[in-house]
Image (cartoon, helix red, strand yellow):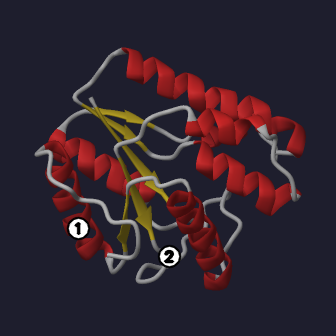
């Protein structure tokens, strides 16, 4: 099983590209639990919600991992929960990072906010490019610091799709598709 994660700021194409990957390669797609949580709760999140959101994301991921698909596509993972907790509340439960580091991920596709417009959807809260760029940089630094395989994706929608599909094909072919710094 190859485990692929789409990471990066909001409105950079994670959900759309996850669907494109699944349509092209098959595999199992795990969505973003926090969206489900917000829809279910019908309110904004608070710091006390972070553990429940993280456990929900992990439960969805674990359920999919148990099925052992050839390709597991994660629209997000705990890195997003950690960084959003810091951005929104200035703190993060310590166990999230340990839980994230205890898992194996074969490749992170880190999506840049550059080249595509921000689109509000009622749950997004970073319309300024500088905010999304800061989130991207925090993601990149964490992935590099923890020696996680990553491939940076930028450009317009057609370029993103082409780059992502090529990176996933290389992953499935067992070729190195990741780089520790910008690609």
Where in the figure is residue 178, as x and y percent of width and height? 30, 60
3D distance between C-alphas at marks 1 and 2 = 15 Å
Where in the figure is residue 12, as x and y percent of width and height? 47, 67
What residue appears at the point 64 percent right and 27 percent down from the top-left corner? 56
> Which is nearer the eye, 117 or 102?
102
Question: Residue 161 occupies which quadrant of the picture?
Answer: bottom left
**Is residue 117 shown left or right of residue 170?**
right
Q: Is residue 10 above or below residue 149?
A: below
Where in the figure is residue 136, as x and y percent of width and height? 56, 70
Q: Is residue 107 above or below residue 66?
A: below
Which quadrant of the rendered structure holds the C terminus?
A: bottom left
Disc 1 on helix, strand or loop?
Answer: helix
**Is residue 181 shown left or right of residue 142?**
left
Question: Residue 142 occupies which quadrant of the picture?
Answer: bottom right
Q: Residues within 10 Å of mark 2 (few under 14, many from 20)?
A: many
Q: Which residue is mark 1?
A: 163
Sequence-wise first label, 1 or 2: 2
Residue 10 in sight here = no
What residue appears at the point 87 percent right and 44 percent down from the top-left corner? 47
Q: Is residue 160 above or below residue 89?
A: below
Disc 2 on helix, strand or loop?
Answer: loop
Please tell me the numbered disc located at residue 113. 2
Which quadrant of the rendered structure holds the N terminus?
A: top left
């Amino acid at each position: 099983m190859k485990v692929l994660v789409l990471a990066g700021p909001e409105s950079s194409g994670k959900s759309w590209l996850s669907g494109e990957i699944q349509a092209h390669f098959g595999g199992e797609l795990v969505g973003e639990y926090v969206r489900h949580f917000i829809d279910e709760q019908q309110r904004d999140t608070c710091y006390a919600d972070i553990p429940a959101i993280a456990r929900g994301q992990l439960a969805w991921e674990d359920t999919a991992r148990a099925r052992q698909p050839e390709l597991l596509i994660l629209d997000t993972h705990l890195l997003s929960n950690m960084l959003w907790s810091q951005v929104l509340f200035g703190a993060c439960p310590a166990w999230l990072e340990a839980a994230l580091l205890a898992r194996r991920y074969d490749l992170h596709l880190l999506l840049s906010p550059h080249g595509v417009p921000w689109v509000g959807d009622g749950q997004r809260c970073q319309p300024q490019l500088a905010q999304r760029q800061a989130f991207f940089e925090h993601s990149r630094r964490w992935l590099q610091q923890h020696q996680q395989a990553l491939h940076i994706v930028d450009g317009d929608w057609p370029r993103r799709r082409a780059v992502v599909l090529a990176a996933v094909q290389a992953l499935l072919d067992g070729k190195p598709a990741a780089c520790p710094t910008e690609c």
